[in-house]
Amino acid sequence: MQRWGAGLAATENQELRATGKAILLLIEEIEALHIELWSAKTALPALPADDADSDGAAAAERSLDRALGARLRRLGRR
């Protein structure tokens, strides 16, 4: 994808160049979201399995995964 976006961004056709730049921006956003997701997952406190809050932490992680997944899908449709 990176190579394809860079190739389009380097063309003389203005529309293709804009498309290539948009692809490159989306790639950067996806990479940033992957980093954000990884950081959020590693920042969650490790709770013992028998802790009453373990269900809450698992629910919070699932919610975060869904929210970031939805954001990635929205970016993919642009």
Image (cartoon, rainbow, N blue to C red):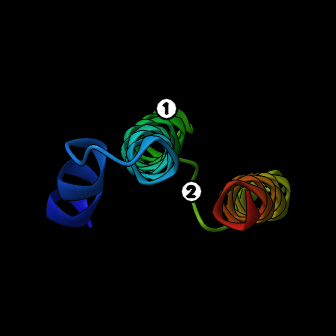
Type of amino acid under label 1: Ala
User: Residue 57, percent across and down?
Assistant: 74, 52
Mark 1 or 2: in front is 1
Q: Nearer the viewer, residue 26 or 10?
A: 10
Q: Nearer the viewer, residue 55 or 29?
A: 29
Q: Residue at x 83, y 58 (%)?
A: 63
User: Residue 6, percent across and down?
Assistant: 20, 49
Q: Residues within 10 Å of mark 1 (few under 14, many from 20)?
A: few
Relative horizontal placement of residue 10, taking residue 19 as reference (left or right)? left
Q: Which residue is mark 1?
A: 43
**Is 31 located above or below residue 45 in the figure?**
below
Relative horizontal placement of residue 2, taking residue 27 as reference (left or right)? left
Q: Which residue is mark 2?
A: 48
Relative horizontal placement of residue 39, taking residue 44 as reference (left or right)? left
Q: Across the whole image, how many numbered discs are drawn on residues? A: 2
The quadrant of the image that shows the N terminus is: bottom left
Q: Which mark is residue 7?
A: none
